[in-house]
Image: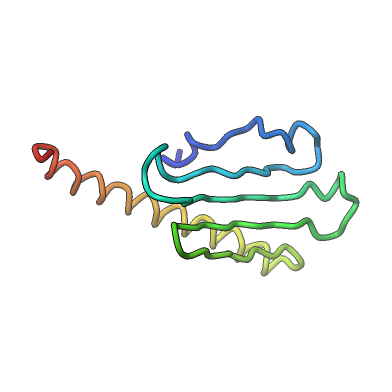
């Protein structure tokens, strides 16, 4: 199981309301540190909205910059690519976290 999955919240308000499979905004920094870094995810539930294409958003921001990643479900090829994209991102982030933890351990004696 991915390291990141432990941080996924399964009880968002929108999920309980049934309008989204996930609708979550999370700050990325601990309170008191830096600015407004965040991640925002949204996957609408197409069965509730009665739409062919649900709205899908993945937005990641640091204090100054924001990126929006696109995910499409219109065709089998696009669905496969969207899942490939998020799987690739999760894998890279997991490897990044591992490398960062190793570097942090080297500095654990520093204050």
Q: Position of residue 48 (x, y in %)?
A: 87, 44
Q: Nearer the viewer, residue 91 or 39?
A: 39
Q: Is residue 101 left or right of residue 106?
A: right
Q: Residue furthest right?
A: 50
Count of marks, rendered view: 0
Please tell me which residue is depicted at 39% across the width and 39% down the height of the picture.
32
Q: Which residue is more in the foreground, 10 or 33?
A: 33
Residue 63 drawn above or below residue 70: above
Q: Which residue is pictured at 47% across the width and 65% down the height?
A: 65
In the image, taking residue 84 as reference, residue 45 lies left or right, namely right
Q: x, y percentage for residue 21? A: 72, 42
Task: State the image coordinates of residue 1 (x, y, percent, origin top left).
Answer: 45, 38
Residue 10 coordinates in the image, percent (x, y): 62, 32
The colour scheme used here is rainbow
Figure quadrant of the C terminus: top left
Q: Residue at x 80, y 37 (%)?
A: 18
Q: Is residue 22 left or right of residue 90?
A: right
User: What's the residue at 86%, 46% (across, down)?
Assistant: 47
Near-viewer residue (19 or 76): 19
Which quadrant of the view contains residue 8? top right
């Amino acid at each position: 199981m991915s390291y990141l999955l432990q941080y996924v919240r399964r009880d968002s308000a929108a999920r309980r309301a049934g309008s989204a499979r996930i609708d979550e905004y999370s700050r990325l920094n601990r309170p008191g540190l830096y600015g407004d870094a965040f991640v925002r995810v949204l996957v609408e539930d197409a069965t509730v909205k009665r739409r062919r294409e649900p709205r899908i958003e993945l937005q990641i921001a640091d204090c100054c910059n924001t990126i929006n990643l696109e995910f499409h479900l219109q065709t089998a090829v696009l669905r496969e690519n969207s899942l490939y994209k998020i799987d690739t991102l999760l894998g890279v982030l997991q490897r990044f976290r591992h490398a960062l933890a190793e570097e942090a351990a080297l500095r654990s004696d520093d204050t």
